[in-house]
Image (cartoon, rainbow, N blue to C red):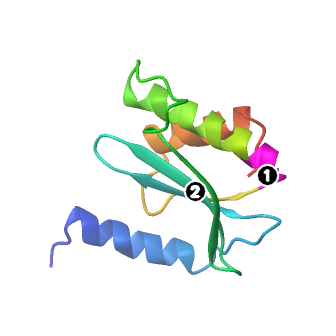
Amino acid sequence: MAFSKVKRREKIRRRIRKNLTGTAQKPRLSVFRSNKEIYVQLVDDVEGKTLLAASSRDKEIAKEGNKSEIAKEVGKLVAQRAEKAGVDAVKFDRSGYLYHGRVKSLAEGAREGGLKF
């Protein structure tokens, strides 16, 4: 039985999330990647609340460059917002995507911005 890409990613995502929960002190940095944009949010799973979010659609993000460069800028932006909110360490949730390309660029940008994984 062949899986579609979406079902395969969902299966991987469930396997990752089974062992990964965010708290107020160390929230989960959750990534969603569409064909055009990339979105990231810090989630406190204990309270069930999103603490903050950033995406490639935000006004602070320059729209020039390729998608990986834009993803790196989003990572820096979320790190900047997390610092203002008093968060310095996170748990990285790649949501079933391979740690490659845009997801990797976003993580590197967040690390450069000062977040610890």
- Corner quadrant of residue 81: top right
Residue 29 percent coordinates (x, y): 62, 58
Residue 7 percent coordinates (x, y): 27, 72
Which residue lies at the image location 24% right of the left edge and 62% below the top edge? 5
Mark 2, residue position: 41
Mark 1, residue position: 85
- Corner quadrant of residue 32: bottom left
In magenta segment, residue 67: no
Q: Residue furthest top?
A: 64
CA distance for labels 1 and 2: 13 Å
- Corner quadrant of residue 27: bottom right
In magenta segment, residue 88: yes
Residue 94 percent coordinates (x, y): 51, 57
Instruction: Indicate the amino acid at tag 2.
Output: Gln
In primary-sequence order, the first of circles 1 and 2 is 2
Instruction: Indicate the amino acid at tag 1.
Output: Ala
Q: Residue furthest left?
A: 1
Q: Within 10 Å of the Cα at label 1, are there few (<14), some (14-19), or many (20+) other Cα atoms?
A: few
* Mark 2 element type: strand
In magenta, the rendered stretch is 82-89
